[in-house]
Image (cartoon, grey):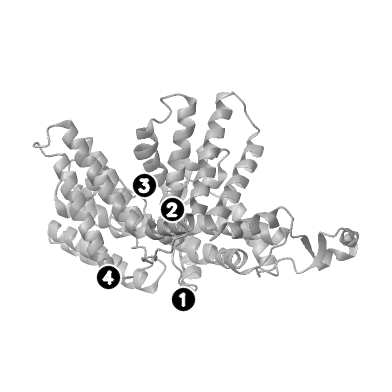
Amino acid sequence: MLFNSYEFIFIFLPISFFIYFFLLEKRLITGAKAFLVFTSLFFYSWWNISYLPLILISMLFNYTIGNSLNENFVKVKIHKKSLLIFGILANLALLGYFKYTDFFLENFNLLFGDSVSLLNLALPLAISFFTFQQIAYLVDSYRGETAEYDFLNYALFVTFFPQLIAGPIVHHKEMMPQFASRWNLVKNYKNIAIGIFIFSIGLFKKVVIADTFAIWATNGFDIAPTLNFIEAWATSLSYTFQLYFDFSGYTDMAIGSALFFNIKLPINFNSPYKSTNIQEFWRKWHITLSRFLKDYIYIPLGGNRKGNFKTYTNLLATFILGGIWHGADWTFVFWGFMHGLALAIHRFWNNLGFTMNKYLAWFITFNFINIAWVFFRAKEFSDAFKILSGMLGMSGIVLTKKYENFLGFLSSYDFISFGTVTEHITGGSKSLNYILIAFFIILLLNNSNQYQKSFKATGKVMLFTLFIFIQSFLKLGDESEFLYFNF
């Protein structure tokens, strides 16, 4: 079920809300939690009920392992560590089977000239997210940082529908105290108002902004055989903004939905495109994934504790793994390598004591991110090179005909011509205007987290919320999945 659907907004969410609090008002706390687990599993099953047993088995397995890691009979440290490793490997094996089997078979066939048949497995929805979330739970249990061992509570922690499909990736210790708090067992009208406000912002980001950029990004990456200079930049920037407004829009809707139930999910985006270096970017982009990569991969590898060279290799390894987590393709591996290398260069730069003008630093950082997204989006390396060659002007520069009268002399250069600027991606001046508006939004306006903190239910705020909700509602018929559902 999509957040940006009539079924979710007008049926699923209100019914879930009213029945949950009705049960709480009757002091049926266990029944209310069980109902919320049931509705979350129904939400998950909406796409394909055949994968429901997968998440149920995964939950039962990880609950059993996590519980065992805290049992008194597991006294020997090596036994606990072996049990933890077994649990992690089992989770990775499940993820690897569905997500990477065909990738490995394709490369095996390419390397050895063989023709092993692919399995063509469909990727179970949310498997990347609930796998990482439960691996974190196992590690936290091993460290003695979990204190809740009731299966119903654990099932609620894993399946809570606002964060189930695409995060934020939450920690057990962040969620369970909230579900247990007696203050959260009654309706909180301020939370409801903030939830509607944040949900509406996220919905507007998705259906009005991101889905509009999606048209030009798709045409440029997947359809156009070649792109001129302006088309290529419009294509890359369209995807850069599509991805941000799509995923941050999803996160806003998740946070807003959770607030209906008095649950505060962690911040996942904090104006990442304002960053002036790549380290700052990863502190602000997909924050919960960055936290997972740092706490459960980078630091266990040694972090920055074993000298500069080891630090650089740890950064590369962490982000290559982060790239692979996003998708089973060499383009994702290369994207992760680019970010790991950029972080190593940034650390090396800082170690030398160099500084840079903040505007220049932002320009370099943003353009690096934009170029790296080209590989993230491209289905093949050839698609990425098509975009990049266009961005370098290797496919020519086309200027609009209205400038031909006074810039006609430029046509003497073979690579400059006059015509329809965005012919291959459509959109005309609208696409370029949207890009300028997107820059204004990401650089000059507050983000949804800041608006949430300063929220006051004034008439102006309510009118603004109603306006953006109506604008979004008018486009709900054009439902599209969120980009991170693919990962």
The disc labelled 3 sits on which kind of residue? Pro
Closer to viewer: mark 2 or mark 3 = 2
Count of labels in the image: 4
Numbered disc 2: secondary structure: helix
Circle 2: is it few (<14), some (14-19), or many (20+) Cα within 10 Å? some
Residue depicted at x 27% and y 45%: 88
Q: Which residue has dot 1 on it?
A: 477
Q: Residue 49 carries which label?
A: 4
Estimate the spatial distance between the alpha carbons at disc 1 and disc 2, rounded to whole Å: 29 Å
Closer to viewer: mark 1 or mark 4 = 4
Closer to viewer: mark 1 or mark 2 = 2
Q: Residue 266 carries which label?
A: 3
Residue depicted at x 63% and y 41%: 364
Q: Report whether residue 197 is seen.
A: no
Numbered disc 1: secondary structure: loop
Estimate the spatial distance between the alpha carbons at disc 4 and disc 2, rounded to whole Å: 24 Å
Numbered disc 3: secondary structure: loop
Circle 3: is it few (<14), some (14-19), or many (20+) Cα within 10 Å? some
Tell me: 164 left or right of 181. Answer: right
Residue 353, x across and y down, in percent: 59, 23
Q: Which of marks 3 and 1 is nearer the N terminus?
A: 3
Estimate the spatial distance between the alpha carbons at disc 1 and disc 4, rounded to whole Å: 24 Å
Residue depicted at x 20% and y 47%: 181
Q: Which residue has dot 2 on it?
A: 326
